[in-house]
Amino acid sequence: MKNAFILGFSDALTLKNIKFFFLSFVILLLTVLPIYLLLSEVVETLFEANGLAEGWMSWVTHFITQVLIGTFGYFLFVPMIFLVISLFSEKIVENIRKKRYPEIEVVESTSALASLLASLFIVLRYVLYFLLASPLLLLFGIGHLLYAVIGFMLFRKLLLLDVLGTHLSYQEVSKQSSTFSGGKHVIATLILYLLSLIPLLNLFVPYFSICVIANQSFLCVNKKKR
């Protein structure tokens, strides 16, 4: 695992790969900003329609709303980056394979359509979990801890599907990404997830995670061959 992190950091800084990080960041900004502005306008309209735009109730309602939206967005921000950078993950992983593991041949992979559909299903399922758990956010500590657990499971599923799907079948990806049934890369994904919780650093973590898990997966393949 240590080698995977060292090699992943080196690969993440190469020009051939990091250009995809910057491109993904631009696409994300152009996508998220209009959604945020639209959501803010909808919230303001609802406040006015229900007579909550004035007085002390306005302040209380705005505060609670911002806490819920902020927490919800905080844990979904990284998955949103994953969805964008997944457009280029296959090229990033292939660059790493050609550079460090040319002896490994990719004979099977998850199709782009299957990966996209699976990613959307995973996000929608975990968004539902977030919504169901949202009332617990009012119990500071317990609710945020539950959100963190759900966030890790979402992070892990998306990361492994995105990376392992480039050189493994969907069945094998599902097996390795299983959280409680002998799945692989558990410690690595946990460390990467904890890094993703740090503001600003979480912009870079999804891209860095792809480089780390790609190296770890290829290293495991080489180890099996020996």
Image (tube, rainbow, N blue to C red):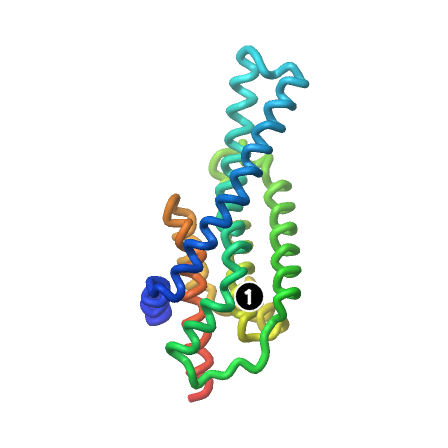
- Horizontal relation, residue 16 to residue 27: left or right: left
- Seen from the viewer's position, the closer of residues 144 and 17 is 17
The residue that label 1 is drawn on is 177
- Image quarter of the C terminus: bottom left
Residue 57 position within the rendered picture, expressed as x and y whole percent measured from the top left: 56, 15
Residue 153 position within the rendered picture, expressed as x and y whole percent measured from the top left: 54, 55
The secondary element bearing badge 1 is classed as loop
Where residue 179 sits, quadrant-wise, is bottom right
- Horizontal relation, residue 25 to residue 138: left or right: left
Residue 56 position within the rendered picture, expressed as x and y whole percent measured from the top left: 53, 13
Residue plotted at (55% across, 59% down): 158
Does residue 146 appear in the picture of this structure? no
| Circle 1: residue type | Ser
- Image quarter of the N terminus: bottom left
- Seen from the viewer's position, the closer of residues 224 and 161 is 161
Does residue 202 appear in the picture of this structure? yes
Where residue 207 sits, quadrant-wise, is bottom left
Residue plotted at (61% across, 16% down): 52
Vertical arrangement, residue 112 with respect to residue 83, above or below? below
Residue plotted at (60% across, 35% down): 135
